[in-house]
Image: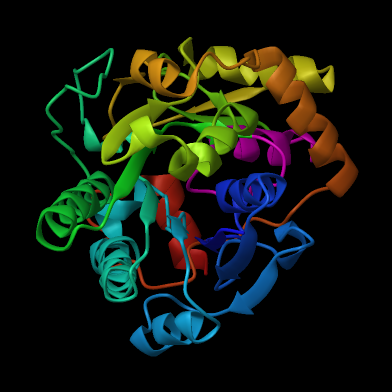
Amino acid sequence: MARALVTGAAGFIGSHVADHCLTLGMDVVATDDLSGGFLENVPEGAAWLQGDIRDPRFIEELWELGDYDYVYHLAAYAAEGLSHFIRRYNYRTNLEASVLLINQSVLRGVQRFVFTSSIAVYGAEQTPMTESTVPRPEDPYGISKYAVELDLAAAHEMFGLDYTVFRPHNVYGERQNISDPYRNAIGIFMNRLIQGLPLPIFGDGLQTRAFSHIDDVAPLIARAPLVEQSRNEVFNVGADQPYTIVELAEAVGRAFGVEPELVHLPARNEVIHAFSTHEKARRTFGDQPTISLDDGIRRMADWVRANGVRAEVPFPGEIEVPTNMPPSWQAMSSAD
């Protein structure tokens, strides 16, 4: 039986990947520091070990439980927009911790390192984004993700560590953290809507994203080590059809049977249009059934209604560079 380590396993994508690894017959060790995840997300059947992968000693402790055939690295703080203002935290959490995990994987002979990157590596004005597009990340989050991709390629060349990189985008669905006011637009919208609050939209809301249900993403990530053609390759993964943020807000309103009130905030510095192609993933993993936006949002809405409101949790650390921060975010950090 293959043995797998899944980081970020109490979080959103990580918990679903751990589920699918168990379904594939793997022996799964799940780890998370619970900074943005919830213990109830960890699937039954996985061995659980809580800790911070930014701590080198904890990385060693994970291997004291035994060696792993596969490492699935999903732990991250994925607030792309906020990353400009928490630069040190971003690089320590998303880059340095990843390097610690890669080092240990090399030392202990891991057969495949599966990494979730992001289409944030591509930057602006490169749509539709393909795997052959030269990355030009515009924010520290995208920079950190691309740096890990480069480090994995270097580790493969020097040490023979095989890897698979996925670049998912705008993933949503059941178990998503809806209490984070800096990321996950669908979660923010749903959490506010069930409280009868208006939905905040930066700028005119005509930014476009291809929102991807978790069931279009997690199964492929879990299968990667079992698909030989995915060895040492990079894949975009997610939905094909882009929608504007206004269209998204309307879809969330339909799922709850209400007409949402939209509040337009000052525009922030962000990539306006971001969506990618997925032909390479389809060639490698085969055609997968996809979930429409309305169906996926309905599924998530059912889950949100069943679980109720979550209080918004501002970023718990220090805002390092408040300069040019969106006023609504600055107000939250000042009130904290």
- Percent across and percent down for residue 194 are 80, 37
From where the camera sits, is residue 248 visible? yes
113 on left or right of 336 = left
Which of the two residues, 299 or 287, is positioned nearer the viewer here?
287
In the shown orientation, is residue 193 left or right of residue 170? right
Relative vertical location of residue 166 with respect to residue 262 in this rendering, above or below: below
Place of residue 219 in the rendered image (x, y in percent of width and height, measured from the top left): 59, 35
Q: Quadrant of the N terminus?
A: bottom right
Q: Do we see residue 260 in this rendering?
A: no
Q: Range of the magenta residues?
A: 173-197
Viewer-closest of 142 and 69: 69
Instruction: Please say if 54 is above or below 167.
Output: below
Answer whether residue 235 is magenta in the image.
no
Q: Residue at x 28, y 12 (%)?
A: 128
Tell me which residue sits at (46%, 39%) in the image: 224
- Quadrant for residue 228, please give it: top left
Q: Main secondary structure of the magenta part?
A: loop
